[in-house]
Image (cartoon, rainbow, N blue to C red):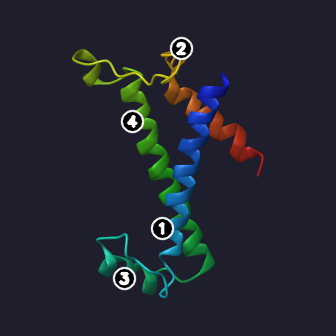
């Protein structure tokens, strides 16, 4: 994987981590939910997810869902879904006009990147 792909995948991981943390932080009754259109639903979760075990389970589920959404978007970019019958999507470096995809599948690289970086924790 080249540096541009690694930077892209690192940014996707940061997005995943940010939104997972935001979901967990929102379980605090004192949290500011200005960003959410579902404040009432968060208040329900705040009163029902109390123990460390419950909050950790919620964190794992949120992380998995967000990772799955990112993976699905990358499959679409890689041409691995029905959209590819009509459109090709590519991520291109602004300066060099070089594709980030090269000969690899970004969705596979993303999962590999997560396995490598999250195993380091």
Q: Is mark 1 on a helix, strand or loop?
A: helix
Q: Distance between the residues labelled 4 and 1?
A: 21 Å
Q: Which residue occupies the extreme left position in the image?
A: 86
The quadrant in which the N terminus is found is top right
Q: Is mark 4 on a helix, strand or loop?
A: helix
Q: Can residue 43 be seen in this view?
A: yes
Quadrant assignment, res 52: bottom right
Asked if marks 1 and 3 touch (Cβ < 8 Å), the reply is no
Which class describes the residues within 10 Å of circle 3: few (<14), some (14-19), or many (20+)? few
Is 15 left or right of 43, judged from the image as shown? right
Asked if marks 1 and 2 touch (Cβ < 8 Å), the reply is no
Residue sitting at x 47%, y 75%: 26
Instruction: Return the residue at label 2.
Output: 102
Q: Viewer-nearest of labels 3 and 2?
A: 2
Q: Is mark 3 on a helix, strand or loop?
A: helix
Image mark for residue 23: 1
Is residue 81 or residue 34 the one in the foreground? Answer: 34
Who comes first in sequence, dot 4 or dot 1?
Answer: 1
Who comes first in sequence, dot 1 or dot 2?
Answer: 1
Q: Viewer-nearest of labels 1 and 3?
A: 1
Which class describes the residues within 10 Å of circle 1: few (<14), some (14-19), or many (20+)? some
Instruction: Return the residue at label 4.
Output: 73
Position above or below: 12 against 5: below
Residue 18 place in picture, x, y as percent = 54, 58
């Amino acid at each position: 994987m080249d540096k541009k792909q690694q930077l892209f995948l690192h940014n996707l991981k940061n997005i995943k981590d940010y939104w997972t943390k935001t979901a967990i932080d929102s379980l605090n009754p004192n949290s500011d939910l200005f960003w959410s259109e579902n404040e009432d639903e968060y208040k329900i979760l705040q009163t029902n997810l109390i123990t460390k075990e419950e909050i950790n389970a919620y964190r794992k589920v949120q992380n998995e869902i967000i990772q799955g959404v990112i993976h699905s978007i990358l499959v679409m970019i890689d041409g691995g879904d029905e959209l590819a019958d009509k459109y090709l999507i590519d991520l291109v470096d602004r300066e060099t006009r070089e594709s980030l995809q090269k000969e690899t599948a970004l969705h596979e690289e993303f999962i590999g990147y997560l396995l490598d970086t999250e195993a380091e924790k």
